[in-house]
Image (cartoon, helix red, strand yellow):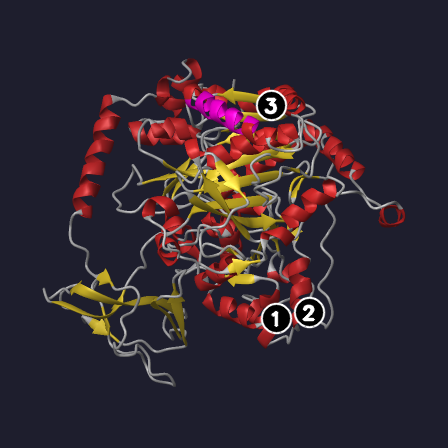
Amino acid sequence: MDVKTASGPLVDVVGRYVRLQRRGRISEACCPFHQERTPSFVVYPDHFHCYGCGAHGDVFDFVARAEGRQLGDVMRQMRNQSGVGATPSPEARARIRLMQEAAEAASNEPDPYEIVSPVPAGVPPLWQGGGQPTARILKPGAALGEALSSQLPVEAVHEYRGYHGELRGFVVRTPRNRRTGKKGAHQVAWARNVRLADGSVTEGWTFVSYPEPRAVYGAPLVTHAREEGKPLRYLIVEGEKCQEAGQASDLARDWIVVSWVGGSNAWLRTDWALIAEGDEVALWPDADESGVGHATMVGIGQHLIALGCRNLKWITPPPAVPNKWDVANAIRDNGWTGDRLRAFVAAGVPWTGAVEPPPPAEAAPVEPLVPGLPPEPSPRERVLSVVEQESLVRFGSRLRQFSTVVQAPPPQLQFTLPGFLRGTVGMVVGAGGSGKSFAMLQTMICLAAGLDIWGLWSDLADEIMALPSPPGRCIYVAAEDPAVVVDWRTHHLGLDAIKRIKGSRHNLDEVLVCIDRNLQIFPVYGAGRENAFALAGSRTETSVVPGPLYENLMQYGRGALAIGLDTLGRVSSTLEEKEGSDMGQIIDIAETLTVETAGANVLFAHHTTKAAALNGQAQEQQAVSGSRKLTDHARWQVNMAIMDAKTGEARALTDADRRRWINVAAAKMNYADNAGARWWRRGEHGILVGGYSPPEQQQRQPNLAGGSVSPKAGSSFARMSREVAGE
């Protein structure tokens, strides 16, 4: 065994000394080696680094620093007695505790200023424009005897806004200083309770350091794209000037251009979590002879991968460009068109983690940039491993030849429920108490019979219609409720189904035999780890692996029509619901299960966010609790919401009556027309019944906000059911 891993993963060793906060593949904490108020100490899978004091190393270095011992002594002890050197000594614990207490005491001291965000309306402008300097800016960090405020010469002023567009302050870029030869970049915000060296307390424009974690520069663009459902393709560039130039160009048609505030050493103070969730992320570094910008971009790339980014690529500046050449130079100085910019970004290579720094300036060929496309990236020259060769063969086996597909008869799309394609993953989403569990169990009973017994999917209350798919075996996993509750629901649903089938044209005995043969109910409440459908690989990785429940379902589910998991949170409790990497991978694992079972649908029950339920947005795709990766990866989604009080009042319903009406919206259907919203009514014992409308709206079916959609008789749900039944 490797001595470094004998005491367990590095994150476990460090976790014995300090309290860590997990963020994807990395963990963060306040540094145990210096006093600080915000975390800058980061533990990666194979090393640690403090971006405050510079502490860096592996498990040996950490233990040596924490214990105050020689590195050689630690290595010998851990080699001879695996793990001993990673057990905190009383002295180390006491020293770290004193440091933490000192940091806590410092955190209780009043801040030298309080940033007002957003910037209040009516305050004096920071800069009047033209060749004028800025207004006077307070200097809370000035020593006694120094100037308490100053004005800055201006090269450029950039607005820094949050994710909702609120103005948080400005970044003021100053011209090159004649004495030092350097340009300046200053963070300025409106602040109150500014404590100055002379003891006075005031408010005004102030030199600040923006709170951490910071929003990316260009944050409103991220929010707008997410709200509009646009492809989340992020292009990361260096600096505010490059971000603004790139976003103002034709690149904005395909990319959301972002950067960060604070210079090359401040990128880790930025929250990159939303960017890591992007569909595609590209890094465009400056052509930097010093290598500082290159190293910064490499650090951002490694950080994004650690946060779960799965589609990252690197853009290498063209040869022979001047030092500091960037996207703004390409547009302003070289006259690159939108097509050339997009082609240059598209030519980026997939991230491998081993990006070579740019060659020295004298080694670069001296030739001017010429119009046309950028040079082709060099091919990947290395020998593939056995695993990579096998993956390449599997990938090649999936090739579809265009002419073959076109000339063959068109494949028939088979649906399990209206719009729910066979062999895909879907979700039934609703707030607590909306009836998700009844909807799941009733749907499984209907699929086992091949009949829409309660009219949930055909919109017909008086006639039991055939579902799009013939009867098939269905597995219902109840992880949220005790077995006695599941049995109680099953009992009453069975009796109600018998009454409904008796009054229909279907043979009762045949239907009951069909249900009994096809329906399998597994209450797993209280089963602990056995009910885990997916598990986190380890504390140091973002990989999610199939759990015991997945393995059991793969055996039981071969040849099944549908597998219902109630609820997603209960069968993935070790995962972070808000982590895009975790939630994306659990849907990926469910898709693997559909393949392993030869086409079974996997249907999760899941919750909406409380905010969506309270704000009347429970029908929207983004109402799903947790990461948007759930909705992005799932192919079918139905949202359930109890009729709100406003709609109930408009229909003259009592509070008790309006709570019996459940509005059901097809929030996502990738493979069929969306028929809009419908109503279900909750009857005796909580049983859901479709095909009815609330009072005063008998002709047109309303949605939750009080609008309306097509009459039920002509809906695609009913039409699809009749077509499958041969009517």
Name the N-terminal-most of marks 1 and 3: 1
Whether 318 is drawn above or below 2: the answer is: below
Look at discs 1 and 3 and give the one toward the viewer. 3
Q: Secondary structure at mark 2?
A: helix
What's the magenta bit mostly, secondary-structure-wise? helix
Q: Which mark is residue 250?
A: 1
Q: Is residue 58 visible?
A: no
- The image position of residue 326, as x and y in percent, is 56, 66
Callout 1 environment at 10 Å: few (<14), some (14 to 19), or many (20+)? some
Whether 669 is drawn above or below 497: the answer is: below
C-alpha separation, residue under disc 2 versus residue under disc 3: 57 Å
Q: Please give the range of residues in magenta.
A: 485-498
Q: Nearer the viewer, residue 287 or 621?
A: 621
- The image position of residue 477, as x and y in percent, is 52, 25
- From the image, tell me which residue sits under label 3: 519
For the residues bearing labels 1 and 2, Cβ distance under 8 angstroms:
yes
Q: Is 496 part of what is drawn in magenta?
A: yes
Tag 1: amino acid: Asp
C-alpha separation, residue under disc 1 versus residue under disc 3: 55 Å
Name the N-terminal-most of marks 1 and 2: 1
Tag 3: amino acid: Leu
Tag 2: amino acid: Asp
- From the image, tell me which residue sits under label 2: 339
Whether 674 is drawn above or below 258: the answer is: above
Q: Nearer the viewer, residue 215 or 128?
A: 215
Callout 3 environment at 10 Å: few (<14), some (14 to 19), or many (20+)? many
Q: Nearer the viewer, residue 376 or 445?
A: 445
Rendered residue at 73%/52% (across/down): 378
